[in-house]
Amino acid sequence: MQNNILFHGSCFGWLISISIDGVVQMFNPFTNISYDLPPLSTIPTIVDYHPELTDEEYTIMRFAFDGSTYTTLESKSSIQKTWLVKIVISSSPSEDMMALAIYGEYNRLAWCKFGDTKWTDFFTPEMFKIVLEDAIFYEGKVYGLNCNAKLYEFDVTTSIGCITQVPMPDDPYIDVNIKYLVRNVEGDLLMVSRFLNHHEVPGIDHPEVCNNTVKFEVYKLHKIAKKWRRIFSLGDYVLVVGLNSSICMMPFSDGKGNWVRNCIYFSDDDVCSQSTEIVGGHDVGIFNLENGEVHKLFPNLELLYPPPIWLFSQNIIS
């Protein structure tokens, strides 16, 4: 792969790459096969793209909190790093495959089908205020989880969102952390909440915030009651979260015949912090749900760029 490529998604053995010129691709490093997804320039809030310009290639539509809009000019480097936060796919490439893109300053949600040439927005009143943190294909539907731990169901056939909402758990700190959606092996929908601490490091114009994971909490959705209820064990399984599509899978061996169960493997997915190339990318490790310990893979780093991403072959996660 080229040096100007960033990865903002992985699943089913496929990496989702974004080039400096806005080309979005699915790439399988195990087979060396790639397929195009719609380019960055077709994201709904990108008004125009002029590659011949310098540092002002993209015209971006932004939202004020009252719903009014305005435009700004942005460089292709900035848009590559930050505008497309994460891509989730429904399956390996096929005629039935769909992809979801969390994008923009308010983490909106767009979708495409395999072979489409542009991204389509979900029409949702005040979508710019929802701020999604993860999305998942679950039981034939699309679900998104926002920063307040509210679960939204989206209808792809009409591109309308907010059909149902599940309120946040009774936890005063649940809205200040990163959250993920995972389907476990029993078919339940889990919400994984990642807690961070922060410290400042010197920046160019101002201090930058360096994040470090300190713990996780896991909740299971009770569909009938429409409530999240906390669980304290994953049993014999592990979760893997980050810029990848969040997954539940069998545990890994530590190489000594021991199988590390009941853990959460995490990577750094704070694309805004990483974009400065001063901090970020380093927050990678394993959290043990049984004893609450965090094992950091890069404990002495504050910057690891481009950030690593979890990737598993189709055979491992099938």
Image: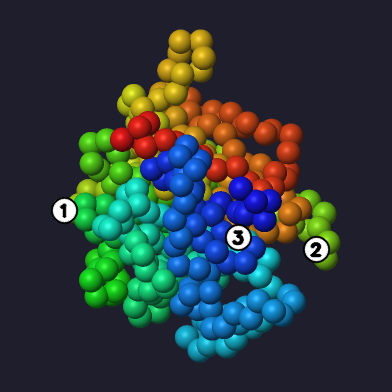
Q: Which residue is mark 2?
A: 206
Q: Going by the picture, which residue comes out furthest to the left?
A: 224
**Which amino acid type is marked by label 2?**
His
Q: Does residue 17 appear in the picture of this structure?
A: yes
Q: Which residue sits at x=53%, y=31%? A: 286
Q: Which residue is mark 1?
A: 224
Question: Relative to residue 74, is residue 296 depicted above or below?
Answer: above
Q: Position of residue 61 (x, y in %)?
A: 55, 82
Cα distance between the residues tagged 3 and 1 = 43 Å
Asked which quadrant contains residue 99, the reply is bottom left
Q: Does residue 143 appear in the picture of this structure?
A: no
Cα distance between the residues tagged 2 and 3 = 28 Å
Q: N-terminal of the two: label 3 or label 1?
A: 3
State the residue in front, 140 or 55. Answer: 55
Q: Which residue sits at x=30%, y=53%? A: 94
Q: Which residue sits at x=57%, y=34%? A: 285
